[in-house]
Image (cartoon, coloured by chain):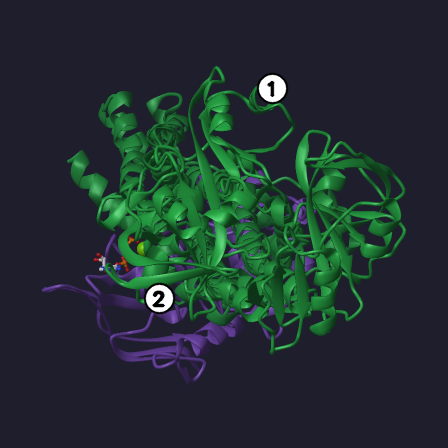
Amino acid sequence: MAIVELKDVSRVYRNGEHEQRALDHVNLSLEEGKFIVVLGPSGAGKSTLLNLLGGLDSPTEGTVTVNGRDISTLTPNELAEYRAASVGFVFQSYNLIPTLTVIENVALVKEIAPNPLSSHDMLKAVGLADHIHQFPSELSGGEQQRVSIARALAKNPHILLCDEPTGALDSQTGVMVLGLLLSMARDMGKTIIIVTHNQNIAKMADTVIRVKNGRIEYCRNQEHPLSVEEVDW
Amino acid sequence: MLLKKLFRTLWQYKAQFISMIIMVALGVGVFLGFNVEWYSLEVNTKEIYDATGFADYRVYSDKGFSETELEAVKAIQGVEDATRFLSLNVSVKDDTDTLALTVSENMNVSGILLMAGEEYDETDTEGFWLSDSYAAANGIGLGDSMTLTYQTISVSGTVKGLVKSSEYLICLPDSNQMMPDYSSYGFVYISPAMLDQAIPSLYRKLMGSLYHQINVKSDLDKAAFVEQADKALGSTRLILSKAETVSWAEAQGEVNEGKTMASILPVLFLAIAILTMVTTMHRITASEKTQIGTFKALGFKDRRILVHYSAYALIIGLIGTALGIGVGYWLGWYIMNPYGAMATYIDMPSWSLHAPRFTWYVLAGINVFLTLIGFLSVRRMLAGTAADALRPYTPKRMRHLRFEETKRFKALGFGTKWNLRDCVRHKARSLMTLFGIVGCMVLLVGGMGMKDTMDSFLDVFYGQAINYATRVNHDSENASLEEGKALAERLKGDWAASRAIQIGDKGYALEIYSVTHDKVRFVDTDMRIVPLTDEGAYVCARIARDFGLTPGDTLTFSPYDSDEHYTVPVAGVLDSMTEGIFMTEAYAARIGVSYTVSCVFTDETDIPEDAHILNRQSKQSIMDSFDTFMDLMNKMVLLLVLAAVVLGIVVLYNLGVMSYTERYREMATLKVVGFKDSKIGRLLISQNLWLTVIGILIGLPAGVGVLQYLLTALASEYELKLTLGAPTYLVSVLLTFGVSLIVGLMVARKNRRIDMVAALKTEE
Ligand SMILES: Nc1ncnc2c1ncn2[C@@H]1O[C@H](COP(=O)(O)OP(=O)(O)OP(=O)(O)O)[C@@H](O)[C@H]1O
Ligand SMILES: [Mg+2]
């Protein structure tokens, strides 16, 4: 069953006379529980696609259906509920609250998510059990990114959206974070969509989507994705 | 290019810039306003003191002064000029009004300023030079005829001139009245020639000289003058310096009030303006830090960057000051204008506005200081190499605080923790918010408390202590004690006698009361009505303070024109308008002071004609005279409340916007995670509300403290007791809360417009 369904979706930015079609009549159908990689050159519309799926933005035309629910016409409040219940987000920047400790940053989702997981378990899973009472500024970049993954997963979402999660990390840390993402998503049976510039990551994907000029160039299923260890970094 | 950037940046931070400009304008306006007020009063009163030869000393005698005595005083070394002077309250025929009939032999001293009509002529025998304010209030014009009566004597003539006089700058019939009421009381000058003609020669022979006063212009200090005058006149006289006259003391009192106000309120406003400037400039330069670094990396010299950013502060300072000067003159005019309440109080010819010279230096100083704040803020961001400057500004690292270890803190919700840590992290911002709320509370409590205090003062002193309908002034010089008592008997009233006394070398009044009909009551220092006992003398609070007297102590006084000294125990301290000592008739009789009835307090409306009745004064007319006074009061309170609200809104809004931009990214994150706008809004507002609660808790006692200080500094002559009504507490708390809540909502509403995508796209 398709967990994500895009029908004739466009996202148009208007700047006076100038019109920028960030997404141009996109049709897409993605299956549940898969590891999906989105590739494409800069400015292609990858982030725009992810933002639409995550309910951060609404399409100009077309419908976005997630889990059988049309999210393209929701009010801002309904979108907030959708984000709280159904999606986890990981960005290139870690976006932690500097005035909250690591555990508090994760635990704050308890106030909104309908069935959150234990913050402590999540932090243990990302290997930060020893740092839970530190402030974000006292952690390294990779550690901070792991906190934000823990926070995204603590909501127990259906989909995990990651927009260049390793973009700010060195390649070794990047691989480590990716492996973590992948194993956790696989173990928990999440649908995971990653935007990246890294071709190697694509080798591990169940599905590879390539975006170009606001259109889907191709959307390919891979029968035998490699595991993290098998990829030659 | 840099100039273009200057204006774009101004636009980008318009909320901050506008609020800083408003704060500077308010600070400058209040500072200039109160200084303009007192200084203009000083300049304009000096003008009329000089123009009409306001006397420095007044020498009194019951028997009047002869020309030889005048010459003797004039001959004193250090006396510039002197005049024999008469001021006598007389009735206007066919009317209940009273005029102070005034004659000054030598108009260079205690003279007049002609506003309309003919020049004063000392040989004229049928001309009145009438107070123009009295004339205006009673519809009297030049050429109208008038008849004045004093006992059996009457004087008729026509109004030849409309005048003002510094002797009657504050024209009060007696110390019971606080505000002049020109519809029933004024003054009129006539020439010595007219006086001569009016008084039958027989009468004059009996009474001796009519001139009870010699008014003197002299630079001698009081002790020296008193010594010289006593020597020249051969006996001790009651001598009052100008500081002891209403027309000088009260007017200077107003000036001093203005000075005190100018030294308190503006400090509050200017301090808030400067603190706002410090926090905001720091905040703006911090957020522009990478830009500053970019300029530096591009090769701009530090000096140019410094000049560029200092220019923001200078622009704010200059615009704020320009607006503030407008506000200041308006405020000065508002308090000090010929149509307002001040003009009812002080009868001056000129109401021009002047600012003391030092205010301009202070304003220049403020602008230099503001620019310096801008300069220092950038310099901090510029420090180090271009690479250092390029790195974005990092606020202090988070550290664990002691209170976080407590169980209670751990149990708090994340929002509370977030807000608490945020307050601690941005101490300056939180402190400023507190300061704004405290300032708002102080102004509200101060302003409304002032009115409460005044209201309860009027209620006790005039509503309760004056329990008669009419006060009949009785000729205590020519009537015997028995005649006075008989009058009181007939009017079913109480009576009082008054004598001038000396305690040490200072002049006071001794008032002796016979209270059997409960027509007058006395008020103690706790504003309670108390009866007088026969156990000693009561002193007013000022005497008690000046001589360090408490009940049980003894006090020695001596009546003027007598060598007797009386030493009496102090039975109590009273709150009183009259500066003096008080006792019952029984006690006065026991110690043997002589007295005659000087006024009778009665409810009778049918008051018989009696040769010894000088005039009568109704309680209503006294109460009416407060209307203008209360009007002034109400305006002041309104101004203060307005200022409080503006101050609260501006300070809180500015800081709210600042806190909002500082937490923009955090809020965007919360939004992405799935927090609803309303929840984020509540988080923002709750921080505001905590600070408001703390601010109110500090502001309430602070407001009471400031009010207490103001009362002692400004109105010590009224012996006011601080009173605050429940509505004052309620209104100040609610209004402060309201302001904080409204501003909170205004800021919180903005979070709907947070663009999550844009906010999180950029690197931290
Ligand atoms: N707020 C906006 N206003 C106008 N145009 C925008 C806006 N956001 C994105 N665009 C345009 O939409 C297009 C797609 O942008 P998007 O951020 O999705 O690209 P991307 O594929 O994520 O690129 P990158 O790999 O560089 O992150 C770009 O051409 C961009 O210029
Ligand atoms: Mg992108």
Left/right of residue B652 with respect to residue A74 in the rendered view: right
A188, above or below A93, in the image: below
> Closer to the camera, B287 or A1?
B287
- Percent x, y of residue B626: 52, 63
Q: Amino acid at mark 1?
A: Lys
Residue corresponding to mark 1? B231
Separation (CA) of disc 1 from disc 2: 46 Å
Q: Residues within 10 Å of mark 2 (few under 14, many from 20)?
A: few
Q: Which corner quadrant of the image does residue B683 belong to? A: bottom right
Question: Label 1's element?
Answer: helix
Task: Give the left or right position of residue A173, taking residue B484 as reference.
Answer: left
Chain in purple (letter): A
Q: Colour of chain B?
A: green
Q: What residue is shown with label 2? A: B138
Task: Look at the image and tell me whether residue B672 can be seen.
Answer: no
Q: Position of residue B214 (x, y in %)?
A: 49, 33
Look at the picture and state if B485 lies above or below B130.
below
Task: Give the mark, 1 or 2, whose residue is nearer the N terminus.
Answer: 2
Q: Residues within 10 Å of mark 1 (few under 14, many from 20)?
A: some
Q: Nearer the viewer, residue B340 or B746?
A: B340
Is residue B502 or residue B16 the one in the foreground?
Answer: B502
Residue A99 placed where, x, y %?
57, 48
Q: Residue at x 24, y 59 (%)?
A: B142
Q: Given the image, on which type of amino acid does mark 2 rest?
A: Asn
Element under disc 2: helix
Q: Are marks 1 and 2 on the same chain?
A: yes
